[in-house]
Image (tube, rainbow, N blue to C red):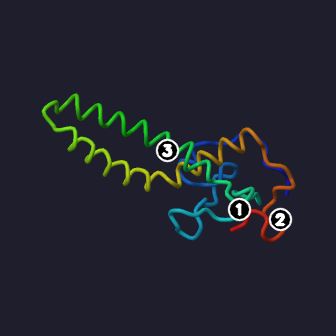
Amino acid sequence: MATPQGKIRFVPLLLLRCPYCGFTPLQANGSWFYFGQGCKTCDYVYEREPGYFTGASWMVNYAVSAVFGCAMGALLLFKLPDLDALWVASIVSVFLIAFGMWFIPYSMAIWLGFDHLIHPLTPADRYRERAPGKGAR
């Protein structure tokens, strides 16, 4: 199979699908926190090396959660100025825990898309030709 042509498509990533073919789900067997080893349609791996998605947690999920948390805190303080700061911190904390858990697969998908945009896949990155234990879960 040839290397997929064209650019990464970000709409399939937001739908948690392969950024190349837009068909294969990224998540492994309905798991919320784990991606599959690779696309069964276009034959390319999702996780290029062990720990590949660690950056997604720190650079994408943390940054987006921090922005939403600050915005939510500012909005609460602006709309409800009499609300105690402890209540604001509690409300924002509960929201951020829930949002952070929900956003994990999306942060991984965004990480995958930008990494593949910067470092395009090569024929050596084919899913079926990869040796066992080389970045596969």
What residue sits 64% from the left and 42% below the top?
Answer: 9
Quadrant position of residue 76:
top left
Crowd class of label 3 (few under 14; some 14 to 19; many from 20; radius 10 Å)? some
Marks 2 and 1, the one that precedes in the sequence: 1
Q: Amino acid at mark 3?
A: Tyr
Please name the residue that numbered disc 2 is placed on: 130
Q: Position of residue 114 (x, y in %)?
A: 66, 41
- Kindly report the distance in space between the C-alpha atoms of the residues bearing marks 2 and 1: 10 Å
- Kindly report the distance in space between the C-alpha atoms of the residues bearing marks 1 and 3: 25 Å
Q: Position of residue 90 (x, y in %)?
A: 26, 48
Task: Between residue 120 and residue 67, name the one nearer to us.
Answer: 67
- 8 above or below 75? below
Q: Amino acid at mark 1?
A: Gly
The answer to whether residue 91 is left or right of residue 39 is left
Please name the residue that numbered disc 3 is placed on: 62
- Kindly report the distance in space between the C-alpha atoms of the residues bearing marks 3 and 2: 31 Å
Mark 1 or 3: in front is 3
Marks 1 and 3, the one that precedes in the sequence: 1
What residue sits 77% from the left and 60% below the top?
Answer: 43
Task: Between residue 8 and residue 60, name the one nearer to us.
Answer: 60
- 37 above or below 94? below
User: Looking at the rendering, in which quadrant would you find the N terminus?
Assistant: bottom right
Task: Between residue 112 and residue 134, name the one nearer to us.
Answer: 134
Please name the residue that numbered disc 1 is placed on: 38
- 90 above or below 132? above
Task: Between residue 54 and residue 45, name the one nearer to us.
Answer: 54
Mark 3 or 2: in front is 3
Crowd class of label 2 (few under 14; some 14 to 19; many from 20; radius 10 Å)? some
Q: Are marks 2 and 1 in contact (CB under 8 Å)?
A: yes
* Secondary element at image label 3: helix
Q: Are marks 3 and 2 in contact (CB under 8 Å)?
A: no
Q: Position of residue 10 (x, y in %)?
A: 60, 42
